[in-house]
Image (tube, grey):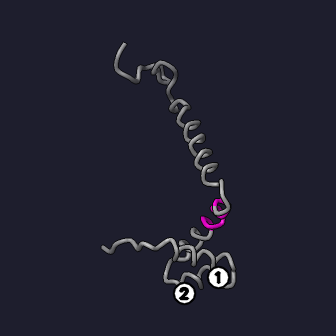
């Protein structure tokens, strides 16, 4: 079994920039750089999504938004459970009185 290939950030940026330029198709870029076409598409998408962070402030805002979303999602009760540990079917889910 072979190990997964690891690529440097510089290599990923170079491939993503080539993909953003659009001079070659993703398949042609993948062949040129020796990676899978899906990887080229992923790197292109990530580069475009994170481009604003290069000009300042975006990293903190993105992290803050991600943390807020995480807290919001985890604050909700688990599906099928109600307050005090009673399940939808009326049985106790936790040990204790």
Magenta span of residues:
45-53
- Residue located beneath label 2 in the image: 32
Q: Is residue 83 left or right of residue 59?
A: left
Q: Main secondary structure of the magenta part?
A: helix
Out of 25 and 60, give the one closest to the viewer: 60
Q: Secondary structure at mark 1?
A: loop
- Nearer the N terminus, badge 2 or badge 1? 1
Q: Secondary structure at mark 2?
A: helix
Q: Position of residue 37 (x, y in %)?
A: 55, 76
Assess disc 2: are there few (<14), some (14-19) or many (≥20) residues with their C-alpha within 10 Å of its C-alpha.
few
Residue 54 painted magenta:
no
Out of 62 and 30, give the one closest to the viewer: 62
Of marks 2 and 1, the one in the foreground: 2
Q: Position of residue 64 (x, y in %)?
A: 60, 45
Res 56 quadrant in image: bottom right
Q: Residue shown at 37%/12% (left/top)? A: 97
Q: Distance of mark 2 from mark 1, alpha carbons?
A: 10 Å
């Amino acid at each position: 079994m072979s190990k997964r290939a690891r690529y440097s950030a510089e290599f990923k940026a170079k491939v993503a920039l080539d993909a953003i330029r659009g001079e070659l198709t993703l398949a042609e870029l993948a062949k040129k750089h020796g990676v899978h076409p899906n990887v080229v598409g992923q790197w292109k998408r990530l580069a475009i999504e994170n481009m604003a962070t290069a000009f300042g402030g975006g990293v903190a805002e993105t992290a803050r938004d991600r943390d807020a979303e995480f807290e919001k999602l985890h604050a909700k009760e688990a599906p099928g459970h109600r307050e005090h540990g009673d399940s939808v079917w009326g049985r106790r889910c936790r040990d204790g009185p």
